[in-house]
Image (cartoon, grey):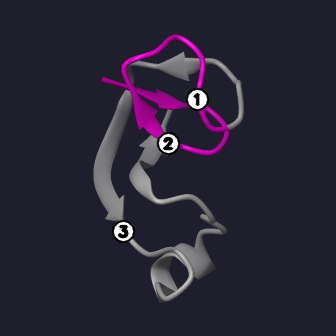
Amino acid sequence: MKACTVCKMISNKDHCPNCGNPTSDNWSGLLIITDPEESNVARELNITVAGEYCLRVR
């Protein structure tokens, strides 16, 4: 699994399917957003697309 260096979405790809930026193997913390419109956490982190996200990526 890899995480986007910009939006922090987790995927198996070398480039993020959400924003197209490069991904990294060096990440930690897992956050799953199922309903970004109703989630206070998603609102705080500016997440608008449901999916798996990391908390920190390098």
Residue at left 63%, top 38%? 18
Q: Secondary structure at mark 1?
A: loop
Percent of width and height locating residue 34: 36, 68
Looking at the rendering, the stretch of residues picked out in magenta corresponds to 1-18
On the image, the x and y values in percent for residue 43 come to: 60, 80
- Secondary structure mainly formed by the magenta segment: loop
Q: Secondary structure at mark 3?
A: loop
- 1 and 49: which one is in front? 49
Say whether residue 3 is magenta.
yes
Answer with left or right where residue 19 lies relative to residue 26: right
The reply to whether callout 1 and callout 2 are in contact (CB within 8 Å) is yes
- Which tag is nearer the camera, tag 3 or tag 2? 3
Which residue is tagged 1?
17
From the image, tell me which residue sits under label 3.
34
Query: Under tag 2, what secondary structure?
Result: loop
| Towards the viewer: 12 or 44 | 12
Name the N-terminal-most of marks 3 and 1: 1
Residue 42 included in the magenta stretch of the image: no
Number of marks? 3
Amino acid type, callout 2: Met
Disc number at residue 9? 2
Give the amino acid type for the residue marked by disc 1 in the picture: Pro
Q: Could you give the CA–CA distance between mark 1 and mark 2, rounded to whole angstroms? A: 8 Å
Q: Looking at the image, is 48 positioned above or below residue 20?
A: below
Sequence order check, earlier mark of 1 and 2: 2
10 Å crowding of disc 3: few (<14), some (14-19), many (20+): few
